[in-house]
Image (spheres, helix red, strand yellow):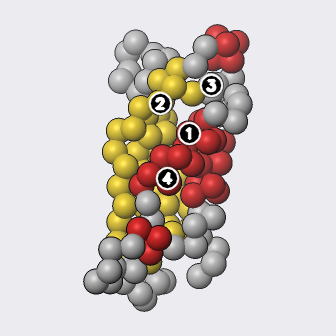
């Protein structure tokens, strides 16, 4: 259990096109995928305003784009895990929760997806 102060970084309803899925049509055409991410970061809030002291949501979004632009990923579980691994390279991050949802596979559902939770192993 972490005893230090923490803060949350949130990214809500980020929609990007990704090549993800096991079906032939999903391997050919990118589909809309929604990302919701909650990051618990070690509290480095001080009086100075130096972005390098904080977890940057810009960097998190760049990490997501890096992973989805690295090639086809068969399962959204793998996609979420790869994003978590990339983000957890930032040692200021204590915990990351990622929800990844496909928005197009079923007419009957708004979305289908997964949620994963990962902790940084540097604590």
**Residue labelled with disc 2:** 16
**Rendered residue at 40%/80% (across/down):** 44
- Please tell me which of labels 2 and 4 falls first in the chain: 2
Between residue 115 and residue 62, name the one nearer to us.
62
Q: Which mark is residue 89?
A: none
Query: How far apart are the two marked residues, 2 and 3, measured between alpha carbons?
Result: 10 Å
Q: Is residue 76 visible?
A: yes
Which residue is tagged 3? Answer: 19
Q: CA distance from mark 1 to mark 4?
A: 9 Å
* Residue 60, label in figure: 4
Q: Residue at x 37, y 61 (%)?
A: 9
Compared with 52, 102 (above or below) is above
Viewed as shown, does residue 97 lie left or right of 80? left
Image quadrant holding the C terminus, namely bottom right
**39 and 58: which is toward the camera:** 58
Disc 2 is placed on an element classified as strand
Question: With respect to residue 88, does 106 lie above or below?
Answer: above
Would you identify the image quadrant in which residue 55 lies? bottom left
Between the residue at mark 3 and the residue at mark 4, the CA separation in whole angstroms equals 19 Å
Q: Looking at this rendering, what residue extends furthest in the left direction?
A: 47
Q: Earlier in the sequence, mark 3 or mark 4?
A: 3
Q: Do the residues under discs 2 and 1 have CB atoms within 8 angstroms?
A: yes
> Element at badge 4?
helix
């Amino acid at each position: 259990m972490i005893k230090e102060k923490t803060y949350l970084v949130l990214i809500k309803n980020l929609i990007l096109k990704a090549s993800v899925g096991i079906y032939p049509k999903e391997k050919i055409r990118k589909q809309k995928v929604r990302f919701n991410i909650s990051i618990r970061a070690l509290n480095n809030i001080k009086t100075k305003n130096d972005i390098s002291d904080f977890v940057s949501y810009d960097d998190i979004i760049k990490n997501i784009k890096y992973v989805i632009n690295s090639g086809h990923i068969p399962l959204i579980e793998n996609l979420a895990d790869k994003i978590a691994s990339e983000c957890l390279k930032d040692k200021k991050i204590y915990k990351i929760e990622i929800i990844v949802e496909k928005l197009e596979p079923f007419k009957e559902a708004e979305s289908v997806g997964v949620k994963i939770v990962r902790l940084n192993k540097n604590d």
